[in-house]
Amino acid sequence: MDPLSTLWETFFDADSMREALPEMLTVGLPNTLILAISAALLGSVLGMALAVAGISRTRWLRWPARVYTDVFRGLPAAATILLIGVGLAPLGMQVWGPNPYPLGILALSLIAAAYIGEIFRSGIQSVEAAQLEGARALGLSWGEAMRLVIVPQGIRRVLPAWVNQLIALIKDSSLVYFLGLLASQRELFRIGQDYAANTGNQSALLLAGLFYLTLTVPLTHAVNWIDRRLRHGRQAAAPADGDDDLDLALPGAAGGNQR
């Protein structure tokens, strides 16, 4: 058989995609969003705590943050998910029953926090020291200066890198299937895998990949637009006809133009 025909029939079969589409929309997409958004929120909070601890002058805060970052950035994501999801499964059974989502979200959050913490730390440290000194000179405490002046500027500077990590987190959510999911708990990738295994056709997996593209590509362009607006601001509106004449009028030429 022609290789191109084989490739087309294996990955681009419209009937296989049409069969998997309803379940991906009603089950896979919501579960993927629950995993990714929950882990992103928790991971960002933990990451900010790690960033502040990592730049602290107190050694007992700084060194644990660095060790945590090194460990969770060095471990494969699958190993961390299995370590948390399987190792803490008995505790999870006692607290919320046979639902792997809380432990899956916890594992993804711990992974994301290590990366997001380094992103936030680099952004905070990129802010000029004069900004902190000026804030302190105005009477702000160190904590107030960090919270109101330094941290907002640092986050703005690393916004694209932060969103890139969120995109990676959306894709890493597919690894939660290692923990074993019920039919109603499957995310996009797992549904694609099941259809591919049942039909012998990989088109459902390609469809799952297209869903991931639909989630991540608009997010990338949106954050790039926000970043441009934050860096350059709104363009000044063009002056109306006749405004230039008023702007060029000499002081005192008309009483209303005097400053």
Image (cartoon, rainbow, N blue to C red):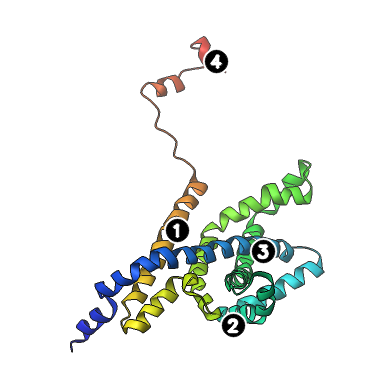
- Quadrant into which the C terminus falls: top right
Q: Which residue is mark 4?
A: 258
What residue would you read off at disc 2? 79
The one of 38 and 128 positioned closer to us in this rendering? 38
Please provide percent x and percent y for residue 8. Answer: 24, 79
Q: Residue furthest bottom?
A: 1
Identified by mark 4, the residue type is Gln
Sequence-wise, which precedes: disc 1 or disc 2? 2
The mark that comes first in sequence, 1 or 4, is: 1
Q: Are marks 3 and 2 in contact (CB under 8 Å)?
A: no
Q: Which mark is residue 46?
A: 3
Mark sitting on residue 219: 1
Cα–Cα gap, marks 2 and 4: 72 Å
Residue 131 shows in this picture: no
Q: Is residue 187 visible?
A: yes
Who comes first in sequence, dot 3 or dot 4? Answer: 3
Residue at left offset 50%, top offset 71%: 185
Q: Which label sits in the foreground, 1 or 4?
A: 1
| Of the image marks 3 and 2, the number of the one nearer the N terminus | 3
